[in-house]
Amino acid sequence: MDRQELNKRMAEWAGWSYKDNLCFPPGVEQTPWNAISYGGLPNFTQSLDACFEWLVPKLGKFQRGLVIERWAIRIILDDKIEPALALYLTIEKLIDEETA
């Protein structure tokens, strides 16, 4: 799965919606004036700011900072990837565990 697909998957989980190749942030009416082009999605795999703005608040019962931090640090050290992608993968792991 490429990063654009990863971003779209996580945006859907965070409540973003799609209509006619346009995307809409959570809680926004789906009108052309509120639309963002598909390329305008938050870049969760490269931006810690986007992760903390849109994803971390949605974690609910999983908002345990030490658990998130430990998993993200382990991913960064083991896989030598950038921190935003590590946080993304950590959140994805928590979501997968919640839905399993």
Image: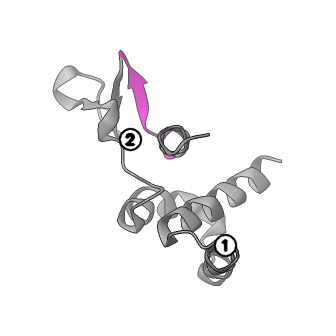
Q: Residue beneath label 2, please?
A: 26
How many numbered dots are placed on residues in this image? Answer: 2
Q: Nearer the viewer, residue 53 or 39?
A: 39
Q: Quadrant of the N terminus?
A: top right
Quarter holding residue 87: bottom right
Mark 1, mark 2: which one is toward the viewer? 1
Q: Magenta span has 16?
A: yes
Please indicate whether residue 45 sits to the left or right of residue 92 in the image. left
- Vertical comparison of 77 with 21: above or below: below
Q: Residue furthest top?
A: 20
Farthest front residue in view: 80
Q: Looking at numbered disc 2 in the image, what kind of residue is underneath it?
A: Pro
Residue 42 image point, x, y percent: 36, 49
The residue at which mark 1 appears reads as 75
Q: Marks 1/2: CA distance?
A: 29 Å
Residue at position x 56%, y 69% in the image: 81
Q: Residues within 10 Å of mark 2 (few under 14, many from 20)?
A: some
